[in-house]
Amino acid sequence: MELVRVRACRGAEGCPHAVGDVAGAAEALRGVLVKTRAAEVVREKAGGLPRVHDQLTIAVSGCPNACSQPQIADFGLIGAEVPQLHAEACVGCGACVEACREAALELHGSALTLVPERCLACGACIRACDYGALTAGESGWRALVGGRLGRHPRLAQELDGYHPLERVEATLETIVELWSAVGRPHERIGALLERVSEDRDVPLHELLRGGVRS
């Protein structure tokens, strides 16, 4: 059995929906796992004989379709590309509205508006626009931590913001180091982060940004 597993969506092979370099992100995270000796941590926390649910799972997805299932991984990424609206360039063709599955774009006559709270930053509207009315604004990775299946399933918690790959790598490194330092036998990443965040009275995003402090 693999002690650590990195799975990537088909964006790594050229899926048209993918935002960002899925293959590159997956390879970068594999590098972090080697650097932090994550496989050895898995073996240590499992007491020498790891079971399937002791495996550390990483998932990288290029869009919110999330084919690699980052929501149930210990650490997951979803590619993100936030549209930037240039209303003066809109010709009212409606292609972007048709492309958006979240109804995050509304066209009233020739006036196009963006509803940010509905947007999943998939980039579909940007690809659909031929007139420059929608271009790529903020981009990066949505980071999710602590998902799992099993007897007590839970969806991963998403960290705020869109993160560059370097920050994502640092976050994963912090998680593995924290797990190595204070993780309990057979404790999953989600349970660990929840426990340490409560014990230290520190919000999760600050805990991961601040590094390991035992």
Image (cartoon, rainbow, N blue to C red):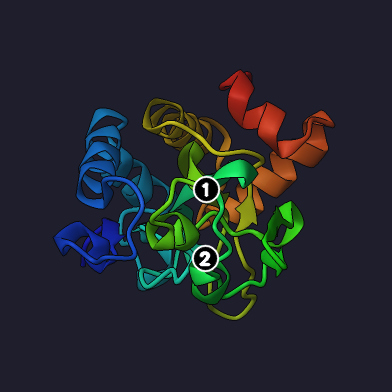
Is residue 47 placed above or below 27 in the rendered structure?
below
Tell me if I can see residue 85 in this picture: no
Q: Residue at x 71, y 55 (%)?
A: 113
Callout 2 touching callout 1 (CB < 8 Å): yes
Is residue 209 placed above or below 48 in the rendered structure?
above
Residue, disc 2: 96
Q: Residue at x 70, y 27 (%)?
A: 206
Q: Is residue 96 left or right of residue 166?
A: right
Amino acid at circle 2: Cys
Amino acid at circle 1: Ala
Image coordinates for residue 148, horizontal then vertical, percent: 54, 68
Badge 2 or badge 1: first in the primary sequence: 2
Image coordinates for residue 92, horizontal then vertical, percent: 58, 63
Is disc 1 surrounded by few (<14), some (14 to 19) or many (20+) residues within 10 Å? Answer: many
Query: How many angstroms separate mark 2 from mark 1 (CA)?
Result: 9 Å
Q: Secondary structure at mark 2?
A: helix
